[in-house]
């Protein structure tokens, strides 16, 4: 297992709630990433910063390209070169959101069609959501556990269908000891977890054009549940503005485990007001990438598109079963990347094969690379271990959860660049050839390559990535061969050391093997 870097609380308050103020003197984050991350937001005050972008037009199913690698998080569905600037991320994030809604969970309704009223009294938050277009209402109630004192307090929202703890499956003392409010999200107030018929669920009363069965208007429950978390956050904001609820709305976390871990991940990905997402042991449909689970896990052993719960997900996703999974334009490393630049930590549990932990590891590596390309690699962490019950947090795992809470809910200056796993020999590099961009950039920054040499490699890489995205495998293989030939030329000329060249070639070889399967 690898922990990078050491978990070392630095106990220096961050000066601002919305941007990092870390300095090279008190963090172990790579300097280039640190410089970029200083000005990037930690959270937003709106649900969706990309709401005004036009949704992409997706091709018919038989026109979708087959990609045997994980899709590039920065390459638009419309084609063209990857857009790597942070300024472009809001638009690209909106595209990924549209794809996830189009192919997996159905539309998350635009909040412009609802009015939200909220009151907080007798420790209970009551949120009434009224749809403007039909006058129907839905009510959310949550008994909030406030710390002693005046606040405002950061808060964690725990996915649940019973109890008043408000921390999901995480130990409550992680939050009570830090004066963090605990808010349970009762998802059955939106759509019921245990039910054979959902027609009478409050969400589907509010939106009668949607349903969980076959045909037009089909959506998955994860769309509805994520919508409910957003409306609960609306209510928290309303009550906080009224002065009745002492919650710091710029420091909110969501968490859940197993099916609720998926719920927390979708909620955090789809609402940019969430500062920290903790997705615990989410299994297939959560952190693990669908295409990776299909490729490396035997059928029937893990949750795949072939055998997931089609109440949770929309019926149309069945079309991507078996090898058709490679036609999915996105995958779940991009669901996790949607959380960026906000903080995300995901966990796994190797004692439970069903959770598809190896796939979760590959997907986490790819999400980690997306975070790094955005300049915020230290805002993502993953912890995959075993030796404990499902949804239990062993003592060795607690510090990981605690440092993310300390930094992103309390503003403490602690190191959060965490990667713990038992898979030193599991090849993930072939799944993400687009990570070669970072390798080329590092060689250029370190002086090993000139600008012209780096540009030559980048041109060949970008050509191969475009071919992969278009499903043109033969062309991609030839273009990757040309990349390797140029790397070997640089080694021969002494521009690259054999070790530097071998690292690049190993990634390409792994990708070529992946494309050839």
Image (cartoon, grey):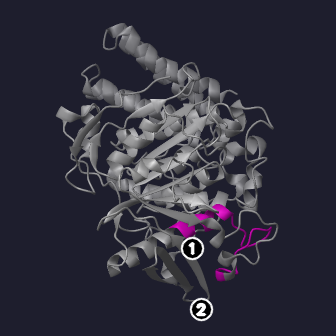
Residue 112: give x, y in percent of width and height: 48, 80
Q: What are the residue bounds of the magenta stretch? A: 206-229
- Vertically, is 302 above or below 507? below
Q: Residue at x 46, y 23 (%)?
A: 2
| Residue 399, position as x, y percentages in the image | 42, 36
The answer to whether residue 342 of the structure is visible from this angle is yes
Say which element carries label 2: loop
**Residue drawn 75% across the image and 40% down it:** 323
Q: Residue at x 48, y 75 (%)?
A: 125
Asked if residue 74 is positioned above or below residue 219 in the image, the reply reads: above
Horizontally, residue 451 falls left or right of residue 233, namely: left
Q: Quadrant of the C terminus?
A: top right
Q: Is residue 219 magenta?
A: yes
Disc 2 target residue: 135
Q: Going from the N terminus, do you reach mark 1 or mark 2 first?
A: 1
Is the Cβ of the residue at disc 1 closer than 8 Å to that at disc 2? Answer: no
The residue at which mark 1 appears reads as 109
Q: Is residue 489 above or below residue 73?
A: above
Q: Residues within 10 Å of mark 1 (few under 14, many from 20)?
A: few
Q: Is residue 80 left or right of residue 64?
A: left
The image shows residue 261 at horizontal and vertical percentages of 59, 50
Nearer to the camera, 459 or 296: 296
**Mark 2 neighbour class, 10 Å CA radius: few under 14, some 14 to 19, many 20 or more:** few
């Amino acid at each position: 297992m690898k922990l990078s870097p050491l978990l070392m609380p630095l106990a220096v308050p961050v000066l601002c709630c919305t941007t990092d103020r870390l300095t090279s003197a008190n963090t172990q984050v790579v300097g280039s990433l640190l410089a970029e991350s200083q000005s990037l937001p930690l959270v937003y005050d709106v649900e969706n910063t990309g709401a005004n972008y036009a949704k992409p037009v997706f091709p018919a199913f038989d026109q979708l390209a087959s990609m045997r690698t994980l899709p590039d998080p920065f390459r638009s569905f419309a084609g063209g070169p990857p857009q790597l600037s942070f300024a472009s991320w809001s638009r690209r994030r909106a595209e990924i959101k549209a794809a996830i809604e189009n192919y997996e969970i159905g539309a998350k309704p635009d909040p412009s069609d609802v009015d939200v009223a909220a009151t907080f009294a007798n420790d209970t938050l009551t949120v009434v959501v009224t749809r403007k277009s039909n006058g129907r209402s839905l009510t959310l109630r949550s008994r909030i556990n406030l710390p002693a004192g005046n606040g405002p307090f950061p808060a964690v929202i725990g996915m649940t269908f019973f109890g008043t703890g408000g921390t999901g499956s995480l130990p409550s003392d992680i939050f009570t000891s830090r004066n963090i409010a605990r808010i349970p999200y009762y998802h059955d107030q939106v759509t019921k977890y245990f039910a054979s018929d959902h027609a009478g669920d409050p969400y589907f009363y509010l939106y009668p054009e949607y349903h969980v069965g076959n045909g037009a208007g089909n959506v998955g429950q994860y769309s509805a549940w994520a919508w409910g978390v957003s409306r609960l956050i609306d209510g928290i904001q309303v009550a906080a503005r009224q002065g009745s609820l002492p919650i710091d709305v710029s420091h909110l976390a969501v968490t859940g485990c197993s099916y609720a871990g998926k719920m927390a991940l979708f909620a955090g990905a789809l609402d940019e007001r969430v500062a920290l997402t903790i997705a615990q042991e989410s299994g297939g449909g959560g952190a693990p990438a669908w295409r990776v689970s299909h490729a490396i896990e035997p059928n029937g052993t893990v949750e795949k598109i072939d055998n997931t719960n089609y109440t949770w997900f929309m019926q149309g996703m069945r079309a991507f079963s078996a090898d058709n999974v490679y036609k999915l334009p996105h995958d779940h490393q991009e669901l996790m990347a949607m959380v960026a630049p906000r903080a995300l930590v995901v966990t796994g549990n190797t004692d439970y094969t069903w959770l598809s932990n190896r796939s979760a590891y590959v997907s986490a590596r790819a999400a980690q690379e997306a975070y790094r390309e955005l300049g915020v690699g230290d805002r993502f962490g993953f912890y995959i271990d075993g030796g404990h019950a499902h949804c239990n947090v062993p003592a060795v795992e607690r510090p990981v959860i605690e440092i993310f809470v300390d930094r992103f809910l309390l503003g403490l200056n602690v190191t959060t660049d965490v990667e713990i796993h038992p898979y030193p020999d599991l090849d993930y590099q072939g799944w993400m050839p687009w990570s070669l961009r970072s390798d080329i950039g590092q060689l250029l920054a370190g002086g090993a390559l000139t600008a012209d040499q780096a540009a030559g490699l980048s041109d060949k890489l970008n050509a191969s990535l475009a071919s992969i995205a278009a499903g043109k495998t033969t062309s991609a293989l030839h273009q990757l061969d040309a990349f390797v030939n140029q790397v070997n030329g640089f080694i021969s000329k002494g521009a690259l050391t054999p070790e530097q060249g071998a690292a690049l070639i190993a990634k390409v070889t792994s990708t070529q093997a992946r494309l050839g399967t």
